[in-house]
């Protein structure tokens, strides 16, 4: 499978036979432009401008924005209800966490998760091989809470998202605070915006992958 990072919390996940899903497309209000992208489906964790720009995704993409289980050719999708804040949604509402199974790999996109780590939520999420997790704070969990989720979930690969990059207009932190919580040998910086993974690439030891697009 292939993972393409499109910026902010947006990724394109591509299964080996070509089925593709775009997660949380954003609009230009974030501070940078989402490239035009095609997909078979688009998932929306919540309806805020930086996560639901579905009109930018072409290819007759099916929109999945509710708690559900759904199948595409070669891809299993499930949406798990969670909260956008630490007060059970009273501040910013609900959030959907999406799980995908592609090519024998379990991927979890946490959306704009804002609630603290709990055994109940962890049980719903496991197993996870690849964890896409917000780390920028303010509107989501921050670096330290994200690290707690990583420690509890123990994925093979962690890809941070929803942090301040060049041009970002949101009041969120850079990725450095999150990376500083890991040993240097656990971090891999990727020049560009895509990686390919196979099941036998997963070692069981957690690796943090950061895309350096600029």
Image (tube, grey):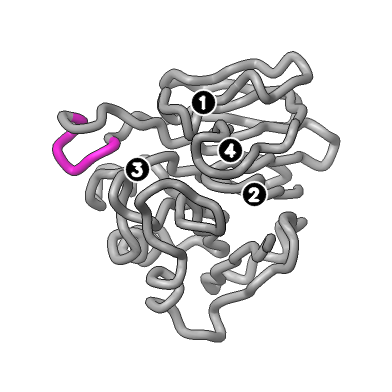
Sooner in the amino-acid sequence: mark 1 or mark 3? 1
Residue in the picture at 43% in, 48% down: 126
- x then y, percent, for residue 13: 69, 41
Residue under label 2: 105
Q: Judge whether residue 3 can be spotted in this image.
A: yes
Q: Earlier in the sequence, mark 1 or mark 2?
A: 1
- Mark 2 vs mark 3, foreground winner is 3
Residue that carries the numbered disc 4 in the rendered image: 100
Is 48 left, or right, of 196 in this rendering?
A: left
**What SS does tag 3 mark?**
loop
Residue pointed to by mark 3: 113
Residue beneath the point at 50% across and 43% down: 109
N-terminal of the pair, mark 3 or mark 4, is 4
Depth check, mark 3 against mark 4: the one in front is 3
**Real-space Cα separation, disc 4 to disc 2, in angstroms:** 8 Å
In this figure, which residue is indicated by the disc labeled 1? 52
Measure the C-alpha gap from mark 1 to mark 2. Answer: 25 Å
Q: Which range is magenta?
A: 84-89
199 lies left or right of 145: right
């Amino acid at each position: 499978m292939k993972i393409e990072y499109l910026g902010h919390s947006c990724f394109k996940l591509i299964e080996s036979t070509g089925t593709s899903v775009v997660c949380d497309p954003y609009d230009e209000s974030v501070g940078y432009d989402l490239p035009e992208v095609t997909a078979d489906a688009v998932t929306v964790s919540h309806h805020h401008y930086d996560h639901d720009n579905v009109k930018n995704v072409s290819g007759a993409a099916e929109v999945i924005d509710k708690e559900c289980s759904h199948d595409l050719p070669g891809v299993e999708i499930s949406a798990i209800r969670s909260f956008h804040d630490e007060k059970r949604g009273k501040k910013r509402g609900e959030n959907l966490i999406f799980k995908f199974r592609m090519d024998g790999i379990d991927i979890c996109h946490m959306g704009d998760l804002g609630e603290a780590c709990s055994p109940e939520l962890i049980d719903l999420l496991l197993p996870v091989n690849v964890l896409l997790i917000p780390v920028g704070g303010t509107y989501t969990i921050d670096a330290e809470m994200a690290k707690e989720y990583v420690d509890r979930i123990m994925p093979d690969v962690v890809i941070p998202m929803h942090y301040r990059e060049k041009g970002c207009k949101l009041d969120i932190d850079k990725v450095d605070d999150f990376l500083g919580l890991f040993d240097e040998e656990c971090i891999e910086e990727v020049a560009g915006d895509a990686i390919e993974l196979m099941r036998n690439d997963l070692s069981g030891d957690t690796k943090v992958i950061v895309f350096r697009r600029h």
